[in-house]
Image (spheres, rainbow, N blue to C red):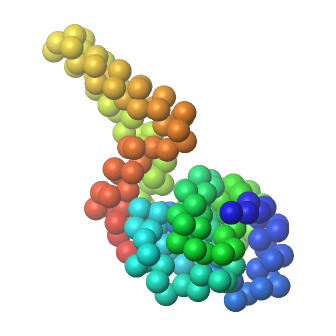
Amino acid sequence: MKKISVEQFDNEFKANSSAQCLDVREPAEYAQTRLENFILCSLSGLSEKSVASFDKSKTTYLLCRSGNRACQAAERLERMNFSDVRVIEGGLGAWESAGKKVIRGTSKVWALERQARFAAGFLVLLGIVLAMTMHPGWVILSAFVAAGLLFSAVTDTCGMAMVLARMPWNRSER
């Protein structure tokens, strides 16, 4: 796996427009904001079957929101014998920060990371309120979420986001 900047991608793709460009975010995120020439191939659905139509010998560029999911997808693709996988560092956030063109959809679904932060905050607050009004044992809910957030930071994965990615509102098609 090779990490490249937004500018490097822009220059490389202009020189090699036959390369494959995959967006590994979830369908609802893709429907909200996407890049021209990028095909949706969500990390949660990434498998031999989902990439069967792609040429494993071609340069394959990967994009997600910040770069983390693209790195995970790159590792999977390399295990599937893709020979030249490149991750766009900083993902869609870096692309937009560089002032590059995006295609905006009409989807009102929040980005997966925002949904996870909302759910974590809601569950912590719920645990505190229930502990204060119903039974002190409810504080365990807040502790469980806090432990999950710590685990998420240490491993750079998010179990809550993985669960949220499978929710119906995040499975909408383009």
Q: Is residue 65 above or below residue 136?
A: below
Decide which of 149, 94 is in the foreground and name it: 149
Decide which of 164, 28 is in the foreground and name it: 164
Q: Residue at x 54, y 78 (%)?
A: 39
Residue 117 image point, x, y percent: 45, 39
Q: Residue at x 60, y 75 (%)?
A: 82
Residue 107 image point, x, y percent: 43, 66
Q: Residue at x 55, y 57 (%)?
A: 72
- How many numbered discs, if any? 0
Residue 127: in sight, yes or no? yes
Residue 145 image point, x, y percent: 37, 29
Residue 28: in sight, yes or no? no
Residue lying furthest left in this view?
134
Residue 45 image point, x, y percent: 40, 67
Determine the image quadrant of residue 104: bottom right
- Image quarter hosting the N terminus: bottom right
Determine the image quadrant of residue 99: bottom right
Q: Residue at x 82, y 67 (%)?
A: 7
Left or right: 74 as drawn, with respect to 147: right
Left or right: 138 as drawn, with respect to 124: left
Q: Is residue 137 above or below residue 164?
A: above
Decide which of 80, 30 is in the foreground and name it: 80
Q: Is residue 25 above or below residue 119?
A: below
- Image quarter hosting the C terminus: bottom left
Left or right: 168 as drawn, with respect to 22: left
Q: Is residue 115 above or below residue 37?
A: above
